[in-house]
Amino acid sequence: MFLVRWFLIITSIIPALLFFNVKRYFLRAKKKLDYKGPIIAALNHTSFLDYVCALLAFPGRRFFVLVSAKFYDYNPVLTFLVKAMGVIRVDAVSGNMDAVNKAVKLLKDGKNILIFPEGHIETEGKLLEFGQAAALMSLGSGAPIIPVYHNGKIGPGKRDKMFIGEPIFPDNYLIKEENLQDQSRTLTKDLYDTIESYRQFYLENFYEAEGKKPKKYKHSNFLYNFVKITAYPAIWAFMHPKYVYENGMARGTRLRQKGMLLVSNHSWWIDAPFMYYVFFKLSPRCIAAQDVADINKSWGFFEKTMGCILLDRSGFDWGAIRTCMECLKDDIPLVVFPEGHMNYDDDLLPFMSGAVMLALMTGVPVAPVYMHTTYKPFRKQVYVIGELIKFDSAFKKADNNSVNLANEVLYKKLTELKHIAIRESSPKFNREVKETRKQMKANLERVNEQIKEAAEKKSGKHAEGEQKNA
């Protein structure tokens, strides 16, 4: 059996890579799984080829897969082949526990198990009811369950997208007051809800789930793409970005294909390019100040090249607001700094209402990002990315009460992300960030004072000139 299994693996590698195009998306805080022991991979079931896709999604791990007796006993040749690959026969009709007991023994011996909790192939694109076998194996062996959802697009020219989540450990369900049946039922329900949440994430965030292709945006022209692509290696090499995710679903924020409102704190003029870097796979636009672009024509040209929407801050700029709304409704990501201008203090400034008004009026989700950085070359820059904020029906009307309440939610979330950034950074780096902001604030105050003195001096000379003329 050993030789047969390796023969099948070696001869199937090239066909598998050609016909099974698997793309993995990790919906967990850390991409790499720290747990090194045996696992139970639980996938939704779209076809009999799911087994091959699962093996490609977990390279380096050998899986024993649970297969129904009907498929196992289909013919002697197939039985021999699947047995060589490590298949566990499941007799669902009799309901005996032989398959579960065998799987538990294998898990305790350090082997991995692959299971399709639905027990049958999906026919309507919806999850079927889950059996409790995965939960019983986890509770009996102590091995965690890795929830996986895949879209089932298998074959030449297709791409099977797999969403791999956080491991579900059985320790949280081993409560002395409950019996095994209650523990298994609760764990099975949580497993189902988790995989269903991944399915919803796919449906809401990927165009192909609707049978559409990703859009090509007018602002993403040659100059836009040239600047973005050439700046990417420079930022990567000199700024050493580090991503920290609030939770597993927060990682999905950067995987999203569709538009969203990207909201962040604002400490320096380079924050917008950094946000373009963080969401490089998208083609975002940014709201920028019209007065700054008017003062520095070169910078204004660069902002227009990068698709910035110039906002007149002296009053209500309906033209810019309408352009922002059209972008969001057209699924174009939009970067907004709700503090309104650069802030060098430790605490966030009170948020202006523009960001949440755009979110409420268009219904797009908000992606909160906190930048914790010294802006110095060869020093790491920490970006804490939060889970998408979706304002429910209570916020649908963009009245003053809804706007204020939504602003409180957004402000609280950015503050939480700031605490995560501080916690995930060393004390030395946190001191450097604080000192950098203090120095930048002093520099800005000095420049403003010089501008003020120059303006007063110019005003005084102008007054003297008028007196002489008189």
Image (cartoon, rainbow, N blue to C red):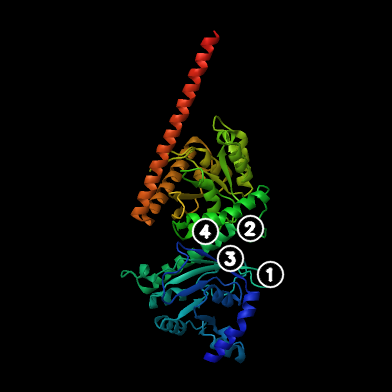
Closer to us: 418 or 304: 304
Q: Which residue is mark 4?
A: 252
Cα distance, mark 2 to mark 3?
Answer: 18 Å
Cα distance, mark 3 to mark 4?
Answer: 21 Å
Amino acid type assigned to the residue bearing label 1 in the image? Gly
Q: Which residue is mark 1?
A: 157
Which mark, residue 301? none
Q: Secondary structure at mark 2?
A: helix
Residue 272 locus on image (x, y percent) = 53, 46
Label 3: few (<14), some (14–19) or many (≥20) C-alpha neighbours in 10 Å: few
* Up-down relation of residue 358 to residue 176 (above or below): above
Label 2: few (<14), some (14–19) or many (≥20) C-alpha neighbours in 10 Å: some
Cα distance, mark 1 to mark 4?
Answer: 25 Å
Q: Quadrant of residue 52?
A: bottom right
Give the residue at x 48% y 78%.
113
* Up-down relation of residue 212 to residue 271 (above or below): below
Residue 388 locus on image (x, y percent) = 50, 52
Q: Earlier in the sequence, mark 2 or mark 4?
A: 2
Q: Earlier in the sequence, mark 3 or mark 4?
A: 3
Amino acid type assigned to the residue bearing label 3 in the image? Lys
Closer to us: 416 or 450: 450
Q: Secondary structure at mark 3?
A: loop
Q: Which residue is mark 3?
A: 126
Q: Secondary structure at mark 1?
A: loop
Cα distance, mark 1 to mark 3?
Answer: 23 Å
Judged from this view, the residue extending furthest toward the front is: 468
Amino acid type assigned to the residue bearing label 4 in the image? Gly
Q: Which residue is mark 2?
A: 207
Asked if labels 4 and 2 touch by Cβ distance under 8 angstroms, the answer is no
Q: Earlier in the sequence, mark 1 or mark 4?
A: 1
Closer to us: 396 or 167: 167
User: Which label lies toward us, 3 or 4?
Assistant: 4
